[in-house]
Every structure is written in C-alpha cells, then in structure tokens.
Amino acid sequence: VGLLFFEIFSHPNPLPAAMARPIQEIAPIFGLPLDGWTVASTYTTSHGKEMKLEIRHFQDSEDDDTHTVLHIGEYQLRDDDEKNRDFANRTFSMKGPEGEVSYGDKRCRGSYWNHPFMWKKGSAKELGEMLMTLADSEEVTVEELISALPWQFN
C-alpha cells in the first residue's frame, strides 16, 4: 500500500477526488449515523466491531495538548498533539494485534533539538498492512476506510 502516516492523517485531502467518498455514502458501511461521528458515542460496525472516538484537550498556562483516539475493535488510531512553552510534539500512531506503528515530529525553542516527521516505530509498509487488515475485516477498501475517519484525522 505504501501510504505514509503523515499523508493519511494530516493532508487536507488524503485521497484523489475520484477515490474520496462523502461520509453520507460511507457511513452506513461502518454503522455510523449519516451526520457522522460524535465524540464519546459508541458505534458498532456492520461486522460487529465496537467503535468509539475520544478527544481529550488539556490547557493551562504552559500546555495546550490534544489527544484524539479512535477505537475500532482491536485497533486504535491516535493523534497526539502536545504543545507546551518549550517543546511541541505531534505523533500519529496505529496499534493493533500486529503491533504498533508511529510517525511524529519534535519542535523546540532551541532548533538543535528539532526533528522533522519521521517513523518512530514501524514503517509505511507495516502501516499499510495494518490498514489493509482492518479494511478487509470490514469488507471495504483502505481508501473507503480512510475516507470514513473522523475529521480530526484529516
């Protein structure tokens, strides 16, 4: 599949227009209401997997962190965006029975410590395999699975 995690979760339109499908078309496949995802609501896919979207936002005088987790059966997709006064990290990850992959960056006041987006665990190939396994279990394509993800992952 060869998809980069960053491209999947941060690009404004991760799929070519011909492959992208509006949520109204894809939602029934995943058991979602036509109006899409609601935070903290639990859904069941058409193949019996429980799905839940969690968003936690923490803010104080030095931090502004947002953690988004989408559970689909045994799988977890995460977007951890941590910003504090001196450092900022953003990590996208997927965890499942096969293991875990993650891709992220590090931004600091001192540019010496900065790191561009790079693989922290796993590879693009492993991510593609995990997405393919999850999509196959729901009898959809990887593109359909990605297009049904909550807006927080786009």
Image (spheres, helix red, strand yellow):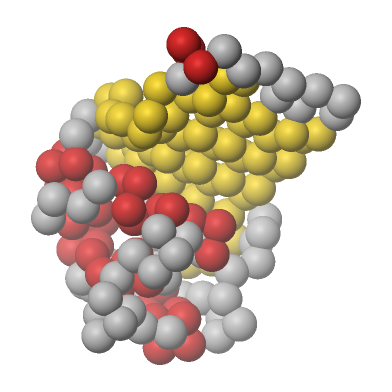
Is 8 situated above or below 80?
Answer: below
Q: Quadrant of residue 39?
A: bottom right
Q: Which residue is nearer to you in this view: 50 or 20?
A: 20
Q: How many marks?
A: 0
Q: Position of residue 82 (x, y in %)?
A: 62, 30
Q: Is residue 76 left or right of residue 4?
A: right
Q: Position of residue 106 (x, y in %)?
A: 48, 24
Q: Quadrant of residue 84?
A: top right
Q: Residue at x 48, y 12 (%)?
A: 113
Is 46 situated above or below 85?
Answer: below
Q: Residue at x 40, y 22 (%)?
A: 115
The answer to whether residue 96 shows anywhere in this view is yes
Q: Position of residue 35 (x, y in %)?
A: 61, 82
Q: Which residue is nearer to you in this view: 59 or 73?
A: 59
Name, please, the residue furthest toward the front. 111
Q: Quadrant of residue 123?
A: top left
Q: Residue at x 52, y 64 (%)?
A: 150
Q: Is residue 58 left or right of residue 144?
A: right
Is 27 situated above or below 134?
Answer: below
